[in-house]
Every structure is written in structure tokens, then in C-alpha cells.
């Protein structure tokens, strides 16, 4: 009885504290991709996903060889709930290009997708690559401070309407890098949540 109680308490504490996200590599068609699992999104995500506004997860994935940067990819996951059809449009872009576009029927399916993100074909496999690591920096609904100040000014002048939709439409690498670098300089960009995950060291078999 006491042992079962200790196990139950342990599970409750584990659930309350969350668990670490994991980043692992995938190899397909001589390219390296990434699988990002178990991101600890904020508790407000469920409500936000049903708001009818577009929710965005921005992810900067870097490939490093012996601590030397080999490549960077910008991933955007955009989720919008259709209030009429009660379905979710989920679009994944890589460097601004749509690579996956689907409609999910339930909130549970969306949460499963967001917590088990697969980002294939990010980097080409090059002969004689040394030990490699991946790093993923994720942001939820980031808005640049300058853009936010413009929105706030507009709202003050037009208090009957809040133009949150479309506040961060650009998906270029320049936009991604600006947002992430602003975070490195003490968060000059606003976002609801952020998380950074690194993969274990791995190698890719030679062709």
C-alpha cells in the first residue's frame, strides 16, 4: 500500500514538473531531419488554439559538426481553428516554403502533432561528416517589439478593433534570425513561451 502511494506521488510530481523535451535526428534520402518531442507548451495553449486566431510555433534548427555551425533552417508551424467547420488547419513551412498542409479534426490531434514534430529533409548529407549535433530553439507566437508597439499605438487610436491576426506574417530567415537574436539580447522580442533543446551526438553512415 505504501509503495503504491509512493509511486502515485512520484507520478504526480513528474506530471506537475513536466518532462524534458527530446531532439533526435532522422536520415532520409541522404538528408538529415529532426524529430522534436515533448515540448512543454504553456497551459494556455489549449484555449489559444480554439481562439480562431493563428497560433505560430517558430523553430530555428541548427546543424553543428564538432561545434562548428554547418547549417540553419527556419521552421514555422501555423495552426488556425475554423470556428464554422470546427477543424484545425495546420501548415508547416521550411524557410518560407510550405512542406506540409493538413486539416486535423480535434484539439487532441493538434496537441499530438505539436508534441511530436517531425521536420524532415533539413540538411544534405555530406561525405566524411564528423560527429554531429542538432539544436532547436522554439518560440510560441513571437511578435517583434517594434511591431508590438505599432499594434498598441493602432489599438489606442482604433479601440474598437484589435489586429492581432497577421501581426507576424513574414517567414523569411531574416525575420527568424532577428527574433532569435533579439532574445539573445535580453528579449527585445515578445513571445508567450520559448524552449531550447539539443540532440545527442550522432553520425551519419557513409553512402
Image (tube, rainbow, N blue to C red):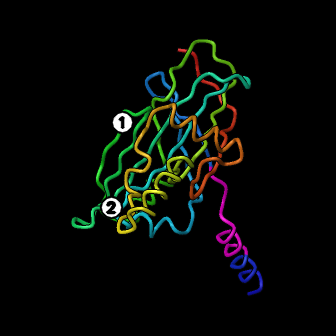
- Does dot 1 land on a helix, a strand or a loop? strand
Please determine whether, in this image, residue 155 is positioned above or below residue 168. Answer: below
77, 205: nearer the viewer: 77
Residue at image point 45% right, 33% down: 172
Q: Distance from label 2 to label 1 (Cα)?
A: 20 Å
Q: Which mark is residue 81?
A: 2
Residue 77 x, y percent position in the rendering: 43, 47
Q: Nearer the viewer, residue 4 or 14?
A: 14
Residue with the mark numbered 1:
99
> Looking at the image, is 199 positioned above or below residue 102?
above
The answer to whether residue 166 is magenta is: no
Left or right? Give the position of 139 relative to 83.
right
Identify the residue at horizontal 61%, vertical 40% (top origin). Answer: 180
Q: Position of residue 128 (x, y in %)?
A: 63, 12
The magenta span reads: 10-21
Quarter of the figure with residue 49? bottom left
Q: How crowded is the residue under tag 1: few (<14 C-alpha within 10 Å), some, or many (20+)?
A: some
Q: Residue furthest bottom?
A: 1
Mark 2 or mark 1, earlier in chain: 2
Kindly report the secondary structure that dominates the magenta region of the rendered protein. helix
Amino acid at each position: 500500500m505504501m509503495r503504491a502511494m509512493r509511486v502515485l506521488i512520484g507520478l504526480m510530481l513528474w506530471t506537475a514538473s513536466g518532462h524534458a523535451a527530446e531532439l533526435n535526428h532522422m536520415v532520409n534520402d541522404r538528408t538529415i531531419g529532426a524529430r522534436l518531442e515533448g515540448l512543454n507548451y504553456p497551459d494556455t495553449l489549449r484555449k489559444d488554439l480554439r481562439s480562431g486566431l493563428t497560433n505560430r510555433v517558430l523553430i530555428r534548427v541548427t546543424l553543428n559538426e564538432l561545434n562548428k555551425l554547418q547549417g540553419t533552417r527556419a521552421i514555422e508551424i501555423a495552426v488556425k481553428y475554423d470556428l464554422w467547420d470546427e477543424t484545425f488547419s495546420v501548415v508547416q513551412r521550411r524557410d518560407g516554403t510550405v512542406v506540409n498542409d493538413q486539416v486535423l479534426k480535434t484539439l487532441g490531434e493538434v496537441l499530438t502533432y505539436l508534441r511530436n514534430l517531425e521536420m524532415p529533409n533539413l540538411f544534405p548529407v555530406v561525405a566524411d561528416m564528423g560527429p554531429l549535433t542538432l539544436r532547436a530553439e522554439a518560440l510560441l507566437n513571437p511578435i517583434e517589439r517594434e511591431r508590438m508597439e505599432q499594434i498598441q499605438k493602432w489599438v489606442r487610436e482604433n479601440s474598437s478593433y484589435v489586429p492581432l491576426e497577421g501581426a507576424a506574417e513574414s517567414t523569411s530567415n531574416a525575420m527568424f534570425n532577428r527574433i532569435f537574436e533579439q532574445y539573445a539580447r535580453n528579449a527585445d522580442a515578445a513571445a508567450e513561451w520559448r524552449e531550447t533543446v539539443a540532440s545527442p551526438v550522432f553520425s551519419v553512415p557513409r553512402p
